Image: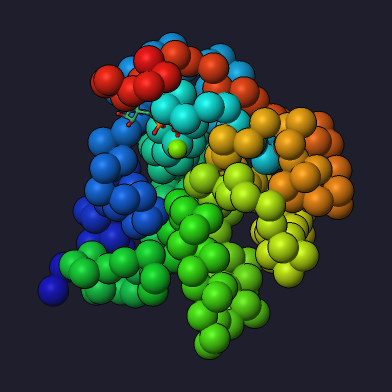
Amino acid sequence: MSDPQTEVFRWNTPESRFALLGVPEWGKDYSFASFPGTVPPEVLAWAAEREPRGLILYGAGSRGKTGLGISILRSLVTPTPLPGERLEQWNMMTIPLLPGASMEGITPDYIGAPCHFVQWDRVLEKYRRERFDQTAWFDGLNTDIDVLMIDDVSAEKVSAYKESFLLRHIEWPFEKKGRALILTMNTHPSKWPDVFGDRTTARLLNPKWFLAYEVKGTGLRTGSRNG
Ligand SMILES: Nc1ncnc2c1ncn2[C@@H]1O[C@H](COP(=O)(O)OP(=O)(O)O)[C@@H](O)[C@H]1O
Ligand SMILES: [Mg+2]
């Protein structure tokens, strides 16, 4: 049998790390390079500098919010080491594979990747399930995840109980240094108080907590009503 250490490195490529993030099939090739428009310098800078605050990408449909967020995740699994940082160190932490384990059939549900993509609707779906274990969900985020992207946060008014659930996600990065949350949404900040309530809006609008960036690119989908 080959040396488990070597085995881990053999599988530990940017592609295999990306495959663990939970990005749906349609986004599996997304990167800054494939982005069909100009990548906003603010978004690139946020990804490169690993700012200690979250990122909100908001704007009308088909502007590239989701595509930019996924491109950031890809850049995080294809890292350029910072001065003094060893790439292998980052890699070792990235894939906590058991010695000798194979990557076959591995899904983000049972192996931790340090970044994770999830659609807000999917999280809510879990949440509505009677047996949803909120503690286990947040424990999982706490132990495994450094950068969480929540795509398409609802434009519908959230109920009080959903607000507190969303707020827990928003506050999650602040329990440990180095964590960040990426949110995408169609909702304009002027509507946030109505949709999310005052407490959540105060966090979202606080520039120490989030960089709120409006993605304004013209409609990217072919034949889109925005384009
Ligand atoms: N990084 C990318 N690489 C390739 N195509 C992309 C990328 N980002 C966006 N697109 C294309 O642009 C379209 C709209 O982008 P999307 O991110 O879904 O917009 P939004 O989230 O603002 O509604 C996508 O359907 C896709 O065709
Ligand atoms: Mg989107």
Picture residue at 60% right of the left edge, 45% below the top:
155
Image quadrant in which you'd find residue 113: bottom left
Picture residue at 47% right of the left edge, 55% below the top:
118
Quarter of the figure with the N terminus = bottom left
Quarter of the figure with the C terminus = top left
In the rendered structure, the answer to whether residue 37 lies left or right of residue 135 reads left
Q: Relative to the observer, which residue lies in front, 203 or 218?
A: 218
Image quadrant in which you'd find residue 74: top left
Residue 39 locus on image (x, y percent): 46, 17
Residue 16 locus on image (x, y percent): 27, 51
In the rendered structure, the answer to whether residue 65 lies left or right of residue 210 reads left
Q: Which residue is outermost to the bottom? A: 131
Q: Relative to the observer, which residue lies in front, 166 or 172?
A: 166
In the rendered structure, the answer to whether residue 122 lies left or right of residue 173 reads left
Q: Relative to the observer, which residue lies in front, 109 or 52?
A: 109
Picture residue at 56% right of the left edge, 73% below the top:
127
Q: Relative to the observer, which residue lies in front, 15 or 214?
A: 214
Question: Compared with residue 194, is residue 186 higher up or lower down, i.e. above or below?
Answer: above
- Does residue 49 appear in this view? no
Residue 147 locus on image (x, y percent): 56, 49
Residue 60 locus on image (x, y percent): 53, 27
